Amino acid sequence: MRLNVSSMLERLQDQTASDNLYLQQSLDEYGDAALEEDEFHETNNPIMDKTLLDASAEGFR
């Protein structure tokens, strides 16, 4: 099997350019919403989080 390295590199460069464009468009479109979502961090176990917060570092030795 013969590999065409230059063709493969060209396709990778094209894919990289396409991916970068997609990421930039996504950032422009959804960046503000993503920042808002990041500010409201919801955990999977709010009871454990409250327990750890209430007990502080002194509660666990």
Image (cartoon, rainbow, N blue to C red):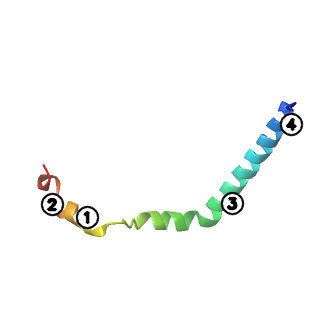
Q: At which x and y percent is residue 45?
A: 32, 66
Viewport quadrant of the N terminus: top right
Q: What number of labels is visible?
A: 4
Distance from disc 3 to disc 4, alpha carbons, whole Å, reads: 27 Å
Which mark lies nearer to you, 3 or 4?
4
- The amino acid type found where label 1 is placed reads Met
Report the disc number at residue 7: 4
Marks 3,1: beta carbons within 8 A: no
**Upstream in the sequence, badge 4 or badge 2?**
4
How many residues crowd mark 3 within 10 Å: few (<14), some (14–19), many (20+)?
few
Distance from disc 4 to disc 2, alpha carbons, whole Å, reads: 61 Å
Distance from disc 1 to disc 4, alpha carbons, whole Å, reads: 54 Å
- The amino acid type found where label 4 is placed reads Ser
**Upstream in the sequence, badge 3 or badge 4?**
4
How many residues crowd mark 1 within 10 Å: few (<14), some (14–19), many (20+)?
few
* In this picture, residue 57 sits left or right of residue 16: left
Give the answer, above or below, for where 30 lies relative to 5: below
**Upstream in the sequence, badge 3 or badge 1?**
3
Which mark lies nearer to you, 3 or 1?
1
Q: At which x and y percent is residue 59?
A: 12, 56
- The amino acid type found where label 2 is placed reads Ala
Q: At which x and y percent is residue 19?
A: 71, 51
- Residue at the (81%, 42%) spot, across then down: 11
Give the answer, above or below, for where 11 lies relative to 3: below
Please name the residue that numbered disc 3 is placed on: 25
Please name the residue that numbered disc 2 is placed on: 55
Please name the residue that numbered disc 1 is placed on: 48
* In this picture, residue 61 sits left or right of residue 44: left
